[in-house]
Image (tube, grey):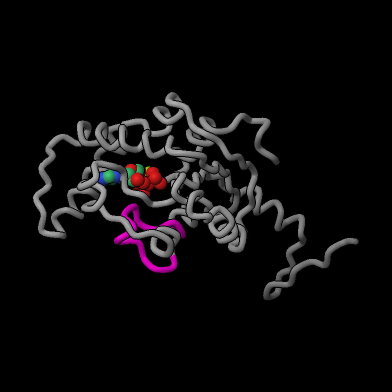
Amino acid sequence: MQKKPIKIGQESYSHQMEQEIYQKMKERTFVLIKHDGVAKGLIGEIISRFERIGLKIVGLKMLLVDEELAKNHYKVTKEWATNLFDKSKKAAEKNGKKFPFKDSIEYGKMIQVWNQEYLREGPIVAIVFEGPHAVEIIRKMVGHTEPRQALPGTIRGDYIIDSYDFADRHKRSIRNLIHASENLQEADREIGLWFKKEELVH
Ligand code: ATP
Ligand code: MG
């Protein structure tokens, strides 16, 4: 059956026009439900939050990560290491602690090793979501890297307690349940790394 055109103000939009706008504006982004999210039984809860807002799943799989994939996922680039270093330093100083590290790349390499271990702790779920502004919307719903700072209502703010301080004392990554691409460039790289073209639907 033909759908009725949508009436907005004086203008009438056909569903074909709506589809064309969607096609122009859609983005794809990459999400990982890390092993702590899987172990806590949060796969359904996390996916349903993104589905409810209107994002589409276009790729989904559960897997164990090998050493090579873990290394390639957490690549130490200058930009990533600088950002990571600044966030970690700011959090330490806010809590009146001295941040003893000087070199962002060296610091990034240390965290990268912890991150690879974290990624390989057990099964994880890799998902590609699609929708307008998907990268930005998902990052907002995921919340701050440090669950201690993540606002209530975000995934990291609602389902886990962890902090830079706590993680550093244990010499491990911050446990924050989920990874989401930070920008479109990162999303493209990560989707290509985790999924073959034929594993994604159109
Ligand atoms: P993700 O990339 O996992 O979505 P993010 O973009 O919020 O998280 P990044 O700065 O990219 O944060 O850091 C990647 C991951 O490294 C974080 O999710 C966290 O698990 C870990 N991490 C970051 N900084 C620290 C730190 N100072 N100590 C321990 N672990 C850290
Ligand atoms: Mg990141």
Q: Which of 158 and 38 is in front in this view?
A: 38
At a point 45% along the width and 60% down the height, the residue shown is 155
**Residue 158 x %, y %:** 42, 64
Describe residue 50's horizontal placement relative to residue 74 as left or right.
right
**Residue 126 x %, y %:** 54, 41
Quadrant of the displayed image that contains ligand 1: top left
**Residue 121 x %, y %:** 43, 38
At a point 36% along the width and 31% down the height, the residue shown is 75
* Magenta segment main secondary structure: loop
Q: Quadrant of the C terminus?
A: top right
At a point 39% along the width and 28% down the height, the residue shown is 71
Q: Which of 182 and 25 is in front in this view?
A: 182
Whether residue 147 appears in magenta in the rendering, the answer is yes
Whether residue 94 appears in magenta in the rendering, the answer is no
- Classify 45 as above or below 105: below
- Classify 94 as above or below 103: below
Residue extending furthest toward the top: 68
- Classify 12 as above or below 17: below
Residue range (magenta): 140-153
At a point 16% along the width and 59% down the height, the residue shown is 94
Q: Which of 67 and 105 is in front in this view?
A: 67
